[in-house]
Amino acid sequence: MKALTYLEQGKFALTEKPRPKLQQPGDAIVRVTMSSICTSDLHIKHGSVPRAVPGITLGHEMVGIVEEVGEQVTAVHPGDRVTVNVETYCGECFFCQHGYVNNCTDPDGGWALGCRIDGGQTEYVRVPYANQGLNKIPDSVTDEQALFVGDILATGFWAARISEIQPDDTVLIIGAGPTGICTLLCVQLKNPKRIIVCEKDGERIQFVREHYPDVLVCTPKDCEAFTRANSEHGGADVVLEVAGGKDTFRLAWQAARPNAIVTVVALYDQDQVLPLPEMYGKNLTFKTGGVDGCDCAEILKLIEEGKIDTTPLITHRFPLSQIEEAYRVFENRLDGVIKVAIVNP
């Protein structure tokens, strides 16, 4: 089968690999019908994910059809259409039992697919702990509607959930990339008084204004002043930092009011610094960490009910045979790209 493979830092290639087989009783084999490219894949390419293993098949955003299951798999059956969770988790360790599945202590726990074990930018993928890692897609939900459930939509849902958003809050979201938009959709479910999106890219600003007209938009240059002018207490009550840059990390706490919550959603290429003397007295609460993908069933239900729709994010579609061109378009932000769908026949 064809598989997009991480060869070495800076180099991916579409290669031939054998079709995966069941290795453990809890495994499932999924025929991938659609996958996507994530910014985290680019982090692997650029060498900022040291745990990524050369030779693995990339990809952790995918949907497909169950082909085969191990003897311990009961949650799904061959023929089921499923979403695949970005995280592998046992469901039994301390962290899994408390909903922190990103910190699963299993050797394959956390973000493994497309990082430490073969992922889904291919034709078939082996999913460990399939009872936890796969969710059946309702018949009324299309592959495109479900494509982001296991990763960036779960990320946005988790971020909104831990941010303790209240009805009277002004919420600032920094970054209107794919994960930023998914975060916005999930923040909207909390019905805060006001949502502000900060973004520097003109095409992405236009996207927000076109699709979410009730959301206020500003640029990083005027973000602090704009947020103060559009909030009651000298800044945002909740800030979600989804952009992942040095400047946006600083902007997140600067635009927050005293005693606010700052939730760091982004994955950074470099260390960030909190200048504590400068921040003294703001009394901020920081919440950090990646996706804890334990809400996928609830997210699928919300999609089925029409309360979440991420299909406008899919701006480009490519067959698997053209995935290297898809990466070029996505990495260089060409042709107004937001998200790419890789479609298998």
Image (tube, rainbow, N blue to C red):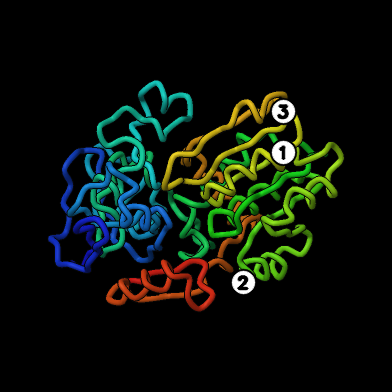
Say few, some or many: other residues with alpha carbon within 10 Å of mark 3 (under 14 / 14 to 19 / 20 or more).
some
Taking the spot 56% from the left edge, 44% from the top edge, the residue there is 298
Three-letter code, disc 1: Ala
Three-letter code, disc 3: Lys
- Using the numbered discs, state the Cα–Cα distance from disc 3 to disc 1 in whole angstroms: 9 Å
Residue 107 in view of the camera? yes
Q: Which residue is mark 1?
A: 256
Q: Which mark is residue 282?
A: 3
2 and 3 marks in contact (CB < 8 Å): no
Q: Which residue is mark 2?
A: 203
- Judged left or right of residue 126, residue 175 is right
- The first of marks 3 and 1 along the sequence is 1
Say few, some or many: other residues with alpha carbon within 10 Å of mark 1 (under 14 / 14 to 19 / 20 or more).
many
Taking the spot 75% from the left edge, 41% from the top edge, the residue there is 236
Q: Helix, strand or loop at disc 1?
A: strand
3 and 1 marks in contact (CB < 8 Å): yes
